[in-house]
Amino acid sequence: MWNWLGITNDPKIPEEGETKGESSESTESQENLTTENGDTTQPQGAEKKMVDVAANLSSYLYTFADKATKTATKLKESVDQRLEQTIVGDFSRENEKFIHERDQRRVGDAVPPWVGFHEEAVMKSQILALSADERNFLRDPPSGVDFQFNLEHMMPVALAVLKDDEELERMRFTVVPKRKKKDRFWRNYFTECH
């Protein structure tokens, strides 16, 4: 058994086939292993060899894990490089370009909700008047109102309105997030605009 750990032919450790009665050396070594209080210990040489074997084993395992990690990293880099050269890489680059262009366009193209209507000046004054009453932001719309709201799509419009409406900026500062969350604040506002 000790051979696979690197310990060979130690006279104090019996071989696999031996029993206590077969060798006088093993009997003597058994007697030498008993201490004064009756505990049995291993001989110093065997302990040192076991510590060395354990150290070698841990060193081997560390080296193995290190090489496996390096190999996995190289494999991942190789796959990433090959993937960049395929249609999937082209798709990823085009997708990133599209998202960047969409974000750029969204901020630049947004206009306040009163732009483009027949009576633009009247509509602008009515929408700006909404910012004066705090209830327009705190009350949720009635259940029968059919208005679909998406904060992500309406945020550029909200930023455009904030440029023209100082009262809305002040109201947003006092209401959000102390009394209403940002999405509920804007949903209530755009429902009133609608």
Image (cartoon, rainbow, N blue to C red):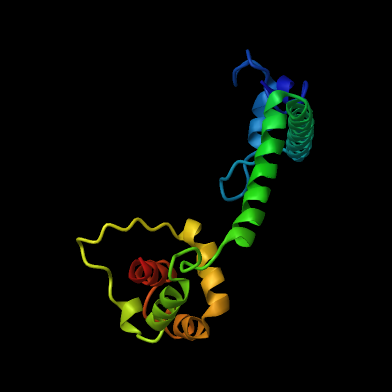
**Image point (67%, 28%), residue name:** 88
Q: Is residue 145 left or right of residue 126?
A: left
**Image point (55%, 78%), residue name:** 164
Q: Is residue 179 left or right of residue 60?
A: left
Closer to us: 160 or 50: 160
In the figure, 13 relative to 149: above or below?
above
Closer to us: 134 or 182: 134
Give the image quarter of residue 39.
top right
Q: Residue furthest top?
A: 17
Q: Is residue 180 left or right of residue 103?
A: left
Give the image quarter of residue 185.
bottom left
Q: Residue furthest front?
A: 118
Residue 19 visible in the current orientation: yes
**Image point (46%, 66%), residue name:** 113
Q: Residue furthest left?
A: 144
Q: Quadrant of the C terminus?
A: bottom left
